[in-house]
Every structure is written in C-alpha cells, then in structure tokens.
Amino acid sequence: MVRTDRIPNPGFPPERLRVTDLDPKKEKQAERTISALFFLSIVGSVLAVAAYILFPIDELDPGSIRLNNMFLGIGITLGLLGVGIGAVHWSKALMHGHELVEQRHPTRGSDESRERAVEIFSEANAESGFTRRTLVRNSLIGAVVATPIPAIALFRDLAPAEDPVALLKHTMWEAGTRLARDPSGTPIKASEVTIGSAFHVIPEGLAELESHRLEEKAKAAVLLMRLPVDELNEDPAKADWSYDGIVAYSKICTHVGCPVALYEQQTHHLLCPCHQSQFDVANHCEVIFGPAARPLPQLPITVDEEGYLVAQSDFTEPVGPSFWERAL
C-alpha cells in the first residue's frame, strides 16, 4: 500500500549569507581579526613565562606573591582566550555556515562512500580556507605551539634546583646546638626531662633563620624522651648517644614523612597517626608494626657545662622516607 498522506521533507531553509560572504572587505577584516587574536595568544603565552621570571616569589615579601600571580594569570588568560576566541570567530565568520545531513552507513563504507569522504575533506579544506588562508593558519599554529609554554616553565621549576639527596642528608643539627622546645625555642635542661615525659624539639636558633625556616624544621624536628636506664636497650655502637636515659629521635616517619607525634609512656612506643607505623623507643626505635621500612634516625646528644641538652653532631643518616637514601 502506498501512503499518500506522508508529510514531504521540507528540506533546509535557504542559507542566510553573512556579511563576510557578501563583502570581500569584511571577509579580509575578519581574517585579520582572527589572526590578531592568535597573535595575542602567542604574546600572552610569552608574557606568562616572562612574568614568572621577572616577578619571582620572595617568601619574605607577600607582595611578590600578588605580583607573580597577577601577571602570570594575565599571561595565561590571554594565551588561552586568544586561541579559543580566535578559533570560534574563524568558524563563525569565515567557514561556510550551511546546514547538512550525514546519512548513517555501515562501519566500513563502500568504495564510492570512501571516495566521497575524501572529497568532503577536500571541500572542508576549501570552505574553511585552512590551506588558502596562510595568515590565519600560520598564526593559529603559532598560538597552539606557544600556549603550552607557560605550563612547561611552571612544571620544570617544580624539579629541585639542587641534589635532593645532599639536601636531605644534612639538617641544622651540629655539635653544640642546643635542643629547644617547639615552638617557643626555649633551651631544655636535662633536669627538666622527667621519666615518661616527651618533648617536641627543634634546634635553637631556628626562629632566627631569614629563609627556608619551614624546610629546615621539617628535616630537623625531634622527639625527646626519658626512660629508666635499666629499660633502655641501646645499640653498643651508640651507647654514648643518650644521656642518663634521655634519647632523641627524628620526628619524621621513615614511611612517607608524616610526623610521629604520639608517645605511649608505659610501653615506650611511638605511633605515626598517618599509617599506624609503631617504633619501640626502648630498642633504638626499631619498627614493630606498620609499613615503615627502617628505625627512626637517632640524634646523638649530651649536656653542656650549663646542663642544657646539646647535639653531638648531625644525624648520621638521612631523615624521613626510606627512598631518600637509596641513591647514597
């Protein structure tokens, strides 16, 4: 049966020509505008890198952070908006705007359809003017190439400027440095450390550092405890690293660097709250539970003439996560 009441396909409405389709001068003007946007993107990307270098961040000057963020943000914004707005304006003003329908077909088309696909690509190239409009094309390529440059500069600067092994192997501790309370910086006398007590310790003079104060504290933080001498099972090679049952160990967990801050005075165990690694202070802080791979480094200590606790030297091994010393 042949249906006679089927609604005929109305087709597409007539194409509405744009100003650039009717006036060659407007078309050339749009082309220059698009190229200018692409060149603006290039300038913005270069400006972001220049701002990152010309306005470095000084940790002692909060205003430097504001200037760095402002000019860096302006450059990246121009770089991204320029290429984005330029591409949209190109498609709106210069590429053909007529509607079309692409019929569905099997995954592998016939030879005729494949040949037609090649023709469509050729027509798209002709309609977009990608090959013909060299100014737009080359400025677009330049903008796309320049846009990732700020990201490359930023991510490159995340890498350590110096050898991290050497930086992590040494801390502020040295012979004669007094042990001080954290955060007040008050020196600690041996007589003030009672059995069962625990002190969070930093090197004396840390607060006077003009730069890298937090970095130095992160490496040099120490826990100080006093145990009954008869319960302290010391390594014979480190027997003189303690003083009358007072021992000092790095506060930085050897798993992933979390602060080991919980001390159980009855069992003499230290607990890292991040991943539950436990260390036995009575047995040179060996690992008794958890993912930590090695004992906490011990800081050799003694007392000075005034009775204050002082370091005998720096740590003799790198502090923190175990992977830090693999390159040693």
Image (cartoon, rainbow, N blue to C red):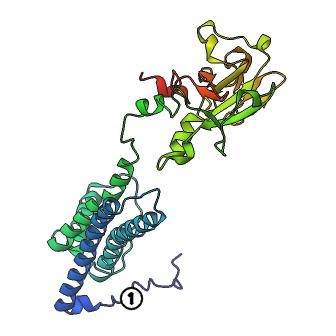
Q: Which residue is mark 1?
A: 13
Q: Quadrant of residue 177?
A: top right
Instruction: Name the side, left or right, on which 65 lies relative to 28.
Output: right
10 Å crowding of disc 1: few (<14), some (14-19), many (20+)? few
From the top left corner, tell me how far across and down residue 199 is, in percent: 72, 34
The residue positioned 67% from the left and 20% from the top of the image is 285
Q: Does the rendering let one see residue 72?
A: yes
Depth check, front residue: 275 or 204: 204
Query: Compared with residue 316, is residue 50 higher up or lower down, i.e. above or below?
Result: below
Instruction: Name the side, left or right, on which 72 lies relative to 206.
Output: left
The residue positioned 16% from the left and 68% from the top of the image is 131
Depth check, front residue: 270 or 109: 270
Q: Does the rendering let one see residue 130?
A: no
| Element assignment for label 1 | loop
**Residue placed furthest toward the right:** 266
Instruction: Name the side, left or right, on which 152 lies relative to 24.
Output: right
From the top left corner, tell me how far across and down residue 137 is, in percent: 20, 69
The residue positioned 60% from the left and 32% from the top of the image is 178
